[in-house]
Amino acid sequence: MNIAEASGHVSGMKSGEGSGGHSKCQSVIVCIPTFNRPEGLRLCLDSICRQVFPADARIAVSIVVADNGDGSVASSLNGTAEQFAFPMRAIHVPDRGLCHARNALFAEARGKADFLALIDDDEIASPSWLWSLVETARSHDADAVIGPVFPRYEPGVASWYLMSG
């Protein structure tokens, strides 16, 4: 998914500067749709902020959250965005449905990054999730890469739902 130029954070590096095996800074926008799950979103964001990268990695990460609820999550996130490890912004998507939220995320990110990474608000990313996706896409010149994320269920979820995988 080669989209274009960076908007994000790289510790003291600019796009195109080189060191080690990673000569070009790669930019990634992590896209997270959410609907009335502030605690799940917080845990998801925490897992994104705990991503680890090799010392010579040249990666600029930013986060966009699409609030598909009443807009209160977007408002509260935009007021506290500086507390996150990566630049973050939230948008409100009033048209209900996951497809509307994801399409709004794609529109928001279009032309702003080399890669997009999608994760839902009820999922937790392992510490190497993002680097693994980027490195796999880069090394195989892939347009799309998928990888595991782990759902986190709210207390009281029906047992049939849990067993569905």
Image: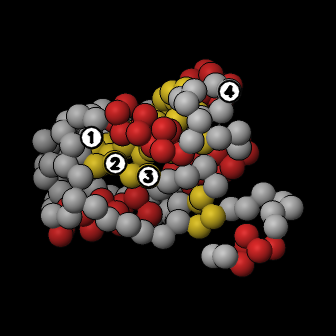
Of the numbered discs in the image, which one, if any, rests on residue 70? 4
Of the numbered discs in the image, which one, if any, rests on residue 113? 1
Within 10 Å of the Cα at label 3, are there few (<14), some (14-19), or many (20+) other Cα atoms? Answer: some
Real-space Cα separation, disc 4 to disc 3, in angstroms: 22 Å
Real-space Cα separation, disc 3 to disc 2, in angstroms: 7 Å
Real-space Cα separation, disc 2 to disc 4, in angstroms: 25 Å
Of residue 142 and residue 59, the one placed in the foreground of this image is: 142
Within 10 Å of the Cα at label 1, are there few (<14), some (14-19), or many (20+) other Cα atoms? Answer: many
Residues at discs 3 and 2 in contact (Cβ within 8 Å): yes
Residues at discs 1 and 2 in contact (Cβ within 8 Å): yes
Residue 91 visible, this orientation: yes
Q: Quadrant of residue 69?
A: top right
Q: Say which quadrant the C terminus sits in.
A: bottom right
Element class at badge 3: strand
Real-space Cα separation, disc 1 to disc 2, in angstroms: 7 Å
13 lies left or right of 61: left
Of the numbered discs in the image, which one, if any, rests on residue 118? 3
Within 10 Å of the Cα at label 2, are there few (<14), some (14-19), or many (20+) other Cα atoms? Answer: many
Element class at badge 4: loop
x 37%, y 31%: residue: 108
Of the numbered discs in the image, which one, if any, rests on residue 116? 2
Q: Earlier in the sequence, mark 4 or mark 3?
A: 4
Element class at badge 1: loop
Q: Name the outermost residue toward the right.
A: 156
Q: Looking at the picture, how far across and down is residue 33, in whole percent?
A: 54, 43
